Amino acid sequence: DLLPAWGGSNRQLPGALVQAVLAQSLNLNHWLSPLSTAFCTAAAAGLGVLLAAAQQRRIGRGLLVGAIIVFVVPLALQLAVSPIALLVPLLLPLAALTATTFLRSE
């Protein structure tokens, strides 16, 4: 049975080693850098207001919101795994988009 490099158990990692790896990964920018959640939510809510103003019929607004969500989710996931490693917050901005779009009554 081969021992790991730190001489401990194969099933456990010492906390100091985990912290050192995390610190080095952060210093080398190997982690995803998230966009501001407030900015993403404000931009999505603004887009929702524009959609509600531009489209009077609720079904038309639903189709536009659905199309935007279908486009944005794969785009955000692609940005998260691309070389620029940009994580776009998804849930809160899409909820803001949906809520502000459907707040307008017909």
Image (cartoon, grey):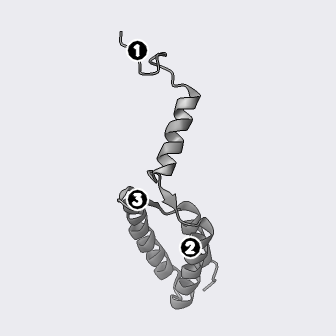
Relative image position of residue 38 (x, y in whole percent): 63, 69
Above or below: residue 101 compared with residue 55? above
Relative image position of residue 48 (x, y in whole percent): 56, 79
* Residue at the (57%, 30%) spot, across then down: 16
Q: Quadrant of residue 44?
A: bottom right
Looking at the rendered structure, the secondary structure element under dot 3 is helix
Above or below: residue 100 compared with residue 27? below
Residue labelled with disc 1: 3
Is 30 left, or right, of 50 in this rendering? left
Q: Quadrant of residue 96?
A: bottom right
Kind of residue at disc 3: Leu
CA distance for labels 1 and 3:
38 Å
Relative image position of residue 34 (x, y in whole percent): 52, 61
Kind of residue at disc 1: Leu
Observer-nearest of 4 and 87: 4
How would you rate the neighbour count of disc 3 (Cα within 10 Å): few for under 14, some for 14-19, many for 20 or more? some
Residue labelled with disc 2: 97
Q: Which comes before the other along the chain, label 3 or label 2? A: 3
Q: Which comes before the other along the chain, label 2 or label 1? A: 1
Task: Indicate which label's residue lies in the foreground, 3 or 2.
Answer: 3
Of the numbered discs in the image, which one, if any, rests on residue 99? none
Q: Quadrant of the N terminus?
A: top left
